[in-house]
Amino acid sequence: MMKSNFRSVVLPLLVSLIVCLLSSTSGVAQQPAPYRLTLHEAIQKALQSNLSVLEAGTRVEEAAGTRARRSSAALLPRVTAQTYANAQNRDLRAFGISLPGMPEVVGPFSNYDFRIYAQQNLIDLQSYHGLKASERALDAGRMDERDARDLIVRVIAGLYLNAQSAVARTEAAQSRVTDSSTLLKLAKDKHDAGTATGVDVLRAQVQLANDRQALLIAENQTKQALLELARTVGLDPAVPLELAEPLNFHLLGQPQIEVLASSALLTRADYISLLSQRQGLVEQQHANRARSYPKLSLNGNFGEIGRSIGSVRSTGLVQGQIDFTLFDRDRDGEAQELSSRVKRIDDQIADLRRGVDEQLREALLNLNSASEQVTVAREGQQLARRELDLAQDRFLQGTTNNVEVITAQDELARAEQNYILAVSSHVDAKFALARAMGDTEKHIVEFMEN
């Protein structure tokens, strides 16, 4: 009897418990926990995986290799070693040696030689300035890498802001659905009480359907924005993504354009890169003029030589050498080419200097305008919310139908969209200002903390 009760009561409970545990575990595996992503973390992940940044890093390594080749080939000592052993015959008549009683061919005899050769350029201005030009090219490559990083930071910040705006619009749409649901319930209650018409109920149902559709659109746009952000920063698109930082408004103090313009030229990687490229071209011009200068070098060798390994003797040689270039037609053509490149890069520097000033002024104008828009949009949002509350009270008291309530809801929705747009424009103006100032990542972090 006890066994029968155990089988009929306890076993089904155990089976149900196991099934629940398995289904719970399966559900967790299919729906992983959302990954909460901060703006700073998104920037760091993008910098580690973005192709443009990786390519810029390889170009820096290539420039470093070019510099090492130039210094090793021309300015540092060159040391080689050579050894050989041979056995040979010699035809003396071929060398103009012919004596009575001496055989025409001598040998065979052996010869062994092991020798170390060294060469060092003492004065070589052309190679020296070539080395300096490669160093400036390396500096320019590093600045290009920094500029690529700044550009990626700006792009990621924009994508993160786009996702923040989409999330804010979804939350606003959800709030409107809540208000419409409340209005529908109120219209049904008043209709049941005989104080509202069926048109009021139908009108509330239409409004709720429209708000639900707007919510679905907003949710889909949010998912797309998060998907694009995840793809760009290198996250798995299958993992749900959440933003750890919502869209907020933080007023930024007004910086002076004069101070910004002077400091931006000291930190803008693209501007510093152009300056380094120009310095490299100037060094190449010096190297071009040095092609006609004499070059002084010192070379020599030391080793062991003999008829066999056991009978070798130490010998060596040290000599100084001066080389002159008497005719070099290519030098004038290269000088003209370098002069044109210097003029071109001077024009680029001047244009970028004006461009930096324009970008700073434009960012400040947008920042001021967006700040004022946020203030006006916040006031409009507050007024629209108050209008909706008054309209709901009037409909509840029976002094009007729900047309006023629906109109007030539409006005509130417009005010919320204006506020989200104004705050997004203000944040984007901060990002643009950070990009114009240079050292984008540092300034974006500072701006978002204030």
Image (cartoon, rainbow, N blue to C red):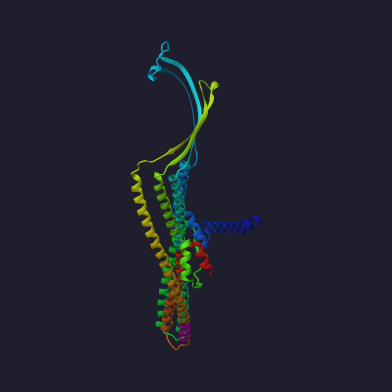
Front one among 235 and 353: 353
**How many numbered discs, if any?**
0
Residue 326: % across, % down: 36, 41
Q: What span is in magenta?
A: 386-395
Indicate the position of residue 95 as horizontal and vertical percent values.
39, 20
Q: Give the overall secondary structure of the magenta segment.
A: helix
Q: Compared with residue 258, is residue 15 higher up or lower down, i.e. above or below?
A: above
Could you say where residue 12 lies in the image, as x and y percent from the top left? Answer: 59, 58
Residue 364 on the magenta span: no
Residue 274 location, quadrant? bottom left
Residue 240 % position (x, y): 49, 60
Q: Is residue 8 left or right of residue 211?
A: right
| Farthest top residue in view | 101
Q: Is residue 392 magenta?
A: yes
Question: As drawn, which residue projects farthest toward the bottom?
Answer: 399
State the residue in front, 269 or 305: 305
Q: Nearer the viewer, residue 70 or 335?
A: 335
Note whether residue 187 is visible: yes
Residue drawn at point x = 47 percent, y = 18 percent: 109
The relative height of residue 249 versus residue 337 in the rendered view (above or below) is below
Closer to the camera in the image, 38 or 94:
94
Image: 217 above or below 289? below
Q: Quadrant of the N terminus?
A: bottom right
